Image (cartoon, rainbow, N blue to C red):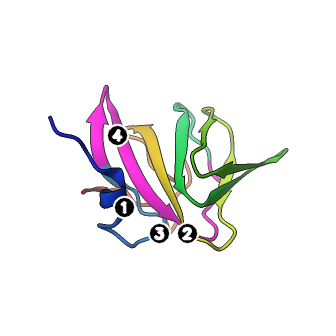
């Protein structure tokens, strides 16, 4: 066991929309990602998704509303809810909790889908 410096971990990668694993607990990965511009409309049939913002503002679009998630805030997207993450052009740093088998594009196969994640 040792402490993990999350800010330091963010400095180890530059890719956007490519989650990196920094920990594992109870069948879930703790992931970090840098986000910029738009992602893809998607949902997760069997798992909720937690987004905790470390830097910037995440704009989460749903079919019926838009939620802005600012630095120091978190948002849980319930399973089965279609969502479209995006930013306002700035880079956003986010921590995610997701089951190990969860793909970040959910049930959508897209050019941004990353099937094998790196540990950092």
Q: Check disc 4 and report the residue beneath it.
A: 29
Q: Is residue 5 left or right of residue 51?
A: left
Q: Check disc 3 and report the residue beneath it.
A: 16
Which one is in front in this view, the residue at disc 1 or the one at disc 3?
Answer: 1
Q: Is residue 79 left or right of residue 111?
A: right
Residue 48 rendering spot, x and y as whole percentages: 55, 33
Residue 56 rendering spot, x and y as whole percentages: 59, 61
Separation of marks 3 and 4 at Cα, in angstroms: 18 Å
Quadrant assignment, res 23? top left
Label 2 with label 3: CB-CB less than 8 Å: yes
Separation of marks 2 and 4 at Cα, in angstroms: 22 Å
Q: Secondary structure at mark 1?
A: helix
Residue 106 appears in the figure: no
Magenta stretch encompasses residue 72 = no
Q: Considering only order in the chain, which callout, 1 or 2, is on the residue closer to the N terminus?
A: 1
Q: Check disc 2 and report the residue beneath it.
A: 91
Above or below, comparing residue 10 to residue 15 in the picture: above
Disc 1 residue crowd, few under 14, some 14–19, many 20+, Cα 10 Å: some
Which one is in front in this view, the residue at disc 1 or the one at disc 4?
Answer: 1
Disc 2 residue crowd, few under 14, some 14–19, many 20+, Cα 10 Å: some
Q: Check disc 1 and report the residue beneath it.
A: 10
Label 1 with label 4: CB-CB less than 8 Å: no
Disc 3 residue crowd, few under 14, some 14–19, many 20+, Cα 10 Å: some
In magenta, the rendered stretch is 22-42
Task: Please report the residue visible at 47 percent of the width from the left and 63 percent of the height from the top.
Answer: 34
């Amino acid at each position: 066991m040792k402490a993990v410096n999350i800010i330091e971990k963010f400095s180890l990668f530059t890719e956007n929309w490519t989650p990196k694993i920094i920990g594992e607990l109870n069948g879930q990965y703790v992931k970090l990602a840098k986000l910029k511009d738009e992602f893809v409309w998607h949902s997760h049939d069997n798992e909720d998704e937690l987004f905790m913002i470390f830097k910037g503002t995440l704009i989460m679009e749903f079919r019926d509303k838009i939620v802005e998630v600012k630095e120091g805030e978190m948002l849980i997207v319930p399973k089965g809810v279609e969502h479209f993450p995006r930013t306002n052009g700035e880079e956003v740093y986010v921590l995610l909790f997701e089951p190990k088998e969860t793909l970040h594009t959910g049930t959508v196969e897209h050019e941004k889908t990353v099937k094998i994640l790196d540990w950092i």
